[in-house]
Amino acid sequence: MRLRCPAFVSALMIANAVGGSMFASHCYADSQINLALVGPTTPVIVNQIIDIKLRATQEQITTLVGTSFVAIDCILQWNPKQLQLQGLVNTGSAPLLSSYFPTVANDYTGINEVIPPADGNALYYALAPLGNPVQVPLTGVQVVTFRFKVRAAFAKSTVSIAPTLTVRTVADTIVYDGTVPGLDVTGTLSSASIVQTTPCPSDIDGNGTVNSSDLALLLNGWGAPGTADINGSGIVDAADLSILLSSWGACPGT
């Protein structure tokens, strides 16, 4: 069980314009607010634009804390070869004072290399209106929507929330309580899974079409294991070539 710290230990400190840590110190509470990513409920296709919603839910614990938040620091992770982050959508989410990826110049952690981040790691900040914490019911509340583009064929891909990540300095995913300043009420962190309509294993380069570039990759990998081993036999051979040629053209669903 987490230990509660006295309220006087932490003082509420809003991050300044250059992107410092949201709050000065971390204390811990018995109650929690869970964060979950919710993805599409149906299979997707290459080049489709998809939404991944960040939702906060309250643990069912009788307490004065852990029922609202003033700020969230969230570290997002995904496979950049499969998915491309397009940006944020705040429509349908709880009203926030700020909802953004800190810019490269303002991100003291070094996680965000461009905006929107493209390397598979992103730091996101949510800040409630001053004096008006966001209430989190048991049914949950939508914080923000992350918008992605499906870049390549895959059977399954995952967008997750990292508890911690170190690039330039250590960064944590944290939910700050709306009652006790600086109180960490972070609970469980859940990922979103995305599945494709029909995987296209012959599309070795992942561009949505089986063509000469895939054939070149297969021939370059001939006689050895690798991504061109379409049938998973452990070696690239005539069987893989036969599968590739029979799949020539656009992948299903693209």
Image (cartoon, rainbow, N blue to C red):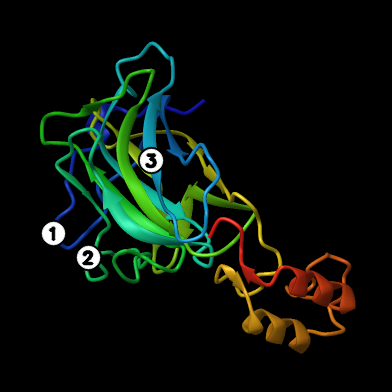
Q: How many marks?
A: 3
Q: Secondary structure under badge 2?
A: loop
Name which residue type carries label 3: Lys
Which circle's residue, 3 or 1, is located before the other in the chain? 1
Callout 1 amino acid: Ala
Query: Which residue is the extreme one toward the left?
Result: 130
Query: What residue type is disc 2 on?
Result: Asn
| Residue placed under numbered mark 2 in the picture | 106
Q: Sort mark 3 into few (<14), some (14-19) or many (20+) by Cα contacts within 10 Å.
A: many
Residue 120 left/right relative to 231:
left
Cβ atoms under marks 2 and 1 closer than 8 Å: yes
| Mark 3, residue position | 53
Residue at x-position 38% and y-position 19%: 139
Q: Position of residue 85 (x, y in %)?
A: 39, 60
Decide: few, some or many residues near mark 2? Use Cα within 10 Å; few <14, some 14-19, many ≥20: some
The residue where tag 1 is placed is: 17
Look at the numbered disc 1 and give the secondary structure of its residue: loop
Precedes in sequence: disc 2 or disc 1: 1
